[in-house]
Amino acid sequence: MKIVGFLSLVFMLLGLSGCSFKETNLKPYTYSLEPMVNLTRTNTPNHDVLKIARIDAPSGLNSRAILYKQEGAMLPYKYGTWSETPPLKLQYLIAEALQDQNHFESVISGTSMASNNLVLESVLQNFEEVFDANDNSYVYVNIRFRLIDIKSGNVLGTTRIASKKTVTKQNGAEGTVEAFNLATKELIEHLAVWINTVR
């Protein structure tokens, strides 16, 4: 009995050391949201100056944590974080893509002191990875937009744009980030189509 107990203890210690060895091999990594957005460029821009206002978001999304939802609970990846919070990065990506498209005379950030006649207000409602009961997952990005004419105060249009992309690599945060890039790319493309028809 003593020998059996001793062997059990040895195997248990080996198992624990194996787990700790795996843990020490995982290194923290910072990911950047960098979708490959390539909008069709307009030859003649209109005379509007569009300001991209700071994107509002729930407090949980104003974090550099890469979040996933499993069994109703929202959890952060332990070994992966964003280089910037999703709302801040999305504001920059939207401004850059719409400026490159050349539909507007100018596209400025929310902190710019330049004068503008239009403002795009946004609320980030979802930016998460969702797991199902079979441990398959997808990312879900959902933003509500509102375009406002500054001089009149009129709301020119509102829309909600959402994108869902399957996570094909279940190897931690890397596959999740790839899916977020695809979803963000699609969302910005749909935003560009919508805002160009509104103004």
Image: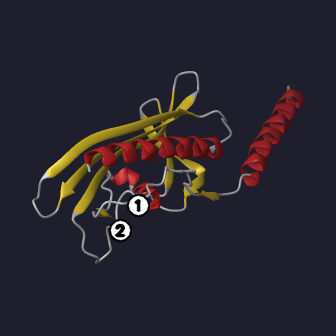
Res. 3 image quadrant: top right
Residue farthest toward the bottom in the current orientation of the protein: 113
Residue 102 is left or right of residue 48, and the answer is right
Task: Give the residue number, with chain letter if any, for mark 1.
Answer: 95
Amino acid at pointer 2? Ile
Quadrant location of the N terminus in the rendered image: top right
Quick one: label 2 or label 1, which is nearer the N terminus?
1
Residue 89 is left or right of residue 179, and the answer is left
Front position in the image: 111 or 21: 111
Res. 54 image quadrant: bottom left
Q: Residue at x 53, y 44 (%)?
A: 180
Pointer 2 with pointer 1, Cβ within 8 A: yes
Front position in the image: 161 or 172: 161
Residue 11 is left or right of residue 142, and the answer is right
Amino acid at pointer 1? Ala
Q: Residue at x 54, y 62 (%)?
A: 83
Instruction: Report crowding for label 1: few under 14, some 14 to 19, many 20 or more residues within 10 A (C-alpha).
Output: many
Place of residue 198 in the rendered image (x, y in percent of width and height, measured from the top left): 26, 46
C-alpha span from label 2 to label 1 = 7 Å
Task: Give the residue number, with chain letter if any, for mark 2.
Answer: 108
SS at mark 2 in the image: strand
Residue 148 is left or right of residue 184, and the answer is left
SS at mark 1 in the image: helix
Q: Residue at x 64, y 41 (%)?
A: 175
Instruction: Report crowding for label 2: few under 14, some 14 to 19, many 20 or more residues within 10 A (C-alpha).
Output: many
Give above or below for 175 relative to 112. Answer: above
Scheme of colours in the image: secondary structure
Place of residue 29 in the rendered image (x, y in percent of width and height, measured from the top left): 65, 57
